Image (cartoon, rainbow, N blue to C red):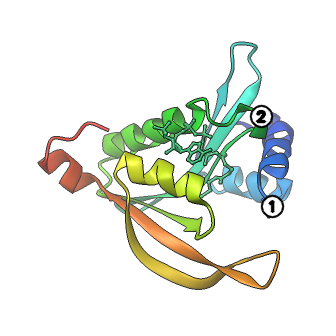
Amino acid sequence: MTSDDLLKVASIEKQSTAFPWSLKHFQDCLKAGHQAWVMCDSDQQIVCFTVVQKVVDELHLLNICVQRQQQGQGFGKTMLNHVIQHAKQLGSVLIVLEVRRSNAKAQSLYNKAGFNEMSVRRDYYPAKQGREDAILMGLDLDLLSLFGASS
Ligand SMILES: CC(C)(COP(=O)(O)OP(=O)(O)OC[C@H]1O[C@@H](n2cnc3c(N)ncnc32)[C@H](O)[C@@H]1OP(=O)(O)O)[C@@H](O)C(=O)NCCC(=O)NCCS
């Protein structure tokens, strides 16, 4: 992801999530040096992106999003696998992320990739009515390599 991608990235984010990151938020992530990728379809149009942050020996998955009309076609899974491979190359021991309690689709994606629920952050997110919990999920890469899994 480069600064040239950000208008499109912010537009995908706005269409696909109820509480989207702003354009400035994406700009700040790039300025801060967070690693970020976009994935394009066969017409070279961006359909998916992700932003991660390396924190010592952990990788924090800050955002992953697929354009609304393109969801359910494997883009999210492919991008998540890319993040997992990247974390392994970095030698990270853990990938962590937060997901809304109501976001069953994303939780299913993470569960299938081997993530486990670690804890709950009560009232972490703004919601349409009041606040919503975040589920903190983690993928232990040491355990993955110990048991020879290859997700
Ligand atoms: C969550 C998201 C990234 C998944 O990406 P996607 O491209 O739609 O998902 P994929 O087609 O790669 O499917 C991967 C897995 O996600 C889950 N999934 C996908 N669509 C689903 C649906 N309609 N209902 C339930 N689970 C679903 C399934 O576990 C699926 O695995 P399967 O194909 O083996 O059944 C995407 O839907 C999205 O961008 N949502 C809005 C933004 C968001 O919620 N981001 C996550 C913030 S924590």
Q: Quadrant of residue 73?
A: top right
Q: Which residue bears the numbered disc 2?
A: 69
Q: Is residue 32 left or right of residue 92?
A: right
Question: What amino acid is found at the position of numbered circle 1 in the picture?
Answer: Ala
The residue positioned 76% from the left and 40% from the top of the image is 68
The residue positioned 77% from the left and 76% from the top of the image is 127
Question: What amino acid is found at the position of numbered circle 2 in the picture?
Answer: Gln
Q: Is residue 107 left or right of residue 48?
A: left
Rendered position, 129 above or below 70: below
Rendered position, 47 above or below 141: above
Residue 28 pos. (x, y %): 74, 58
Q: Residues within 10 Å of mark 1 (few under 14, many from 20)?
A: few
Give the quarter the ligand 1 occupies.
top right
Q: Which residue bears the numbered disc 1?
A: 18
Q: Is residue 43 left or right of residue 146?
A: right
Rendered position, 124 above or below 29: below
Callout 2 secondary element: helix
Answer whether residue 41 is visible to the viewer in this image. yes
Residue 8 versus residue 125: which sits nearer the camera?
125
**Mark identifier at residue 112:** none
Residue 38 versus residue 101: which sits nearer the camera?
101
Residue 132 versus residue 31: which sits nearer the camera?
132
Q: Is residue 37 left or right of residue 107?
A: right
Q: Quadrant of residue 150?
A: top left
Residue occupying the far top of the picture: 42
Callout 1 secondary element: loop
Q: Quadrant of residue 59?
A: bottom left
Q: Quadrant of the C terminus?
A: top left
